[in-house]
Image (cartoon, helix red, strand yellow):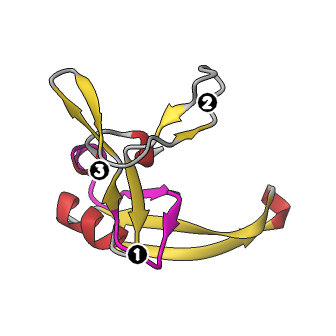
Amino acid sequence: MFEHVPTPDVAFAEVHRSLRVGGVHLFTIPRDPSRPTRARAERVDGGVRHLLPPEHHRDPISGAGALVFTDWGSDACERIARATGAGCDVRRVQLPECGVPDEVEVFVAARDR
């Protein structure tokens, strides 16, 4: 979902702010660890300015799909840590008994103060 947010740093900071001390934000984001994070689009004057060719992910509500604003990359945890002032870690999990048969990356951002 955070790839579809126009200002992900603001969104991560707000999630972190809303956690109680000791709380943990677990989430997944699609990322390419072979390159740094890059912006695909940005909000400008109430519209969208495309920095790269538009990319959309499937959206059950809109046939047009959901616009991707950010291509997450190798520096995702560093960017999230900068936005929240907290640590961020990536864990690879596979839980076939829970319907996750293939290994996925799960990001863990904790509020420790």
Check disc 2 and report its element: helix, strand or loop.
Answer: loop
Residue 24, compared with residue 75, is above or below; it is above
Q: Residues within 10 Å of mark 1 (few under 14, many from 20)?
A: few
Residue assigned mark 2: 59
**Residue type beneath disc 1:** Arg
| Left or right: 52, with 84 as reference point | right
Residue 56, compared with residue 73, is above or below; it is above
Q: 105 and 98: which one is in front?
A: 105
Q: What is the tally of numbered marks visible in this picture? A: 3
Q: Residues within 10 Å of mark 3 (few under 14, many from 20)?
A: many
Residue assigned mark 1: 35
Q: Position of residue 92 (x, y in %)?
A: 60, 76
The reply to whether the magenta stretch includes residue 28 is: yes
Q: Residues within 10 Å of mark 2 (few under 14, many from 20)?
A: few
Q: Residue at coordinates 28% horizontally, 62% vertically from top-left?
A: 80
Check disc 3 and report its element: helix, strand or loop.
Answer: helix
Marker disc for residue 69: none
Q: Position of residue 93 (x, y in %)?
A: 65, 73
Marker disc for residue 12: 3
Q: Position of residue 95 (x, y in %)?
A: 76, 67
- Marks 2, 3: nearer the viewer: 2
Residue range of the region highlighted in magenta in the rendering = 10-37
Q: 33 and 93: which one is in front?
A: 33
Q: Position of residue 71 (x, y in %)?
A: 42, 57
Look at the image and tell me in which quarter the C terminus lies: bottom left
Are the two marked residues, 1 and 2, in contact with CB atoms closer than 8 angstroms? no
Q: Quadrant of residue 38?
A: bottom left
Q: CA distance from mark 2 to mark 3?
A: 22 Å
Q: Residue furthest bottom?
A: 34
Mark 1 or mark 3: name the one nearer the start of the chain: 3
Q: Residue at coordinates 43% horizontally, 45% vertically from top-left?
A: 53
Residue 12, compared with residue 45, is above or below; it is below
